[in-house]
Amino acid sequence: MKESLSAKKALLIISSALLLGLLIGAFVLPNHAKAAEATKELKIKTSAQCEMCQDRIQTKMSKVTGVNKAVLDLNDKVLTVNYDPGKITPDEVRKAVTNIGYSADNLPSDPKAYKKLPKCCKLPKDRK
Ligand SMILES: [Cu+2]
């Protein structure tokens, strides 16, 4: 009698473990996949001019809520942003770039922020 009881216990433990495994498989793993999906990539053409612009844009953009990573390619001045679409929209990402003083795709730079940029970071027509 005692033995069959411990056998029942063992069965209970094993089936609990299996159930737990199923639960993990059913809930945790898909959430994990969702978390990976939560990062989207956006490419934005900017008016960056030099390495100082690159530093400025990358540093400031990486501090924007919802932005995971921002990398500027100085060859084509395209900013690649990895962002969380649950926290920020593409338009808000572009707006954040304009607030630093640079144009973002079709959006013009914020005039005040642009004015504060050092000469080398302004457009060639404004450097004199
Ligand atoms: Cu610059």
Image: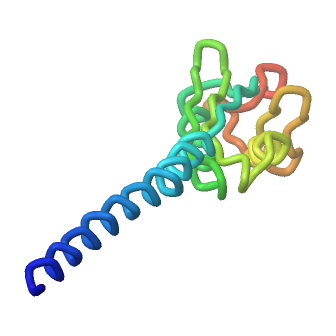
| Looking at the image, residue 50 lies above or below residue 57 | above
The picture quadrant where one finds residue 8 is: bottom left
Q: Is residue 40 visible?
A: yes
Give the image's coloring scheme.
rainbow
Place of residue 7 in the rendered image (x, y in percent of width and height, measured from the top left) = 16, 73
Left or right: residue 6 versus residue 49 is: left
- In depth, the one of 84 and 62 nearer the eye is 84
Q: Residue 47 vs residue 54: left or right?
A: right
Q: Quadrant of residue 24?
A: bottom left
Question: Which residue is depicted at the point 69% across and 27% down?
Answer: 48
- Position of residue 82 measured from the top left corner of the image (x, y, whole percent): 61, 38
Residue at x-position 65% and y-position 14%: 76
| Residue 17 horizontal side relative to residue 66, left or right | left
Q: What quarter of the picture does the N terminus occupy? A: bottom left
* The one of 27 and 85 positioned closer to us in this rendering: 27
From the top left corner, tell me how far across and down residue 74 is, in percent.
Answer: 58, 20
Above/below status of 50 relative to 7 = above
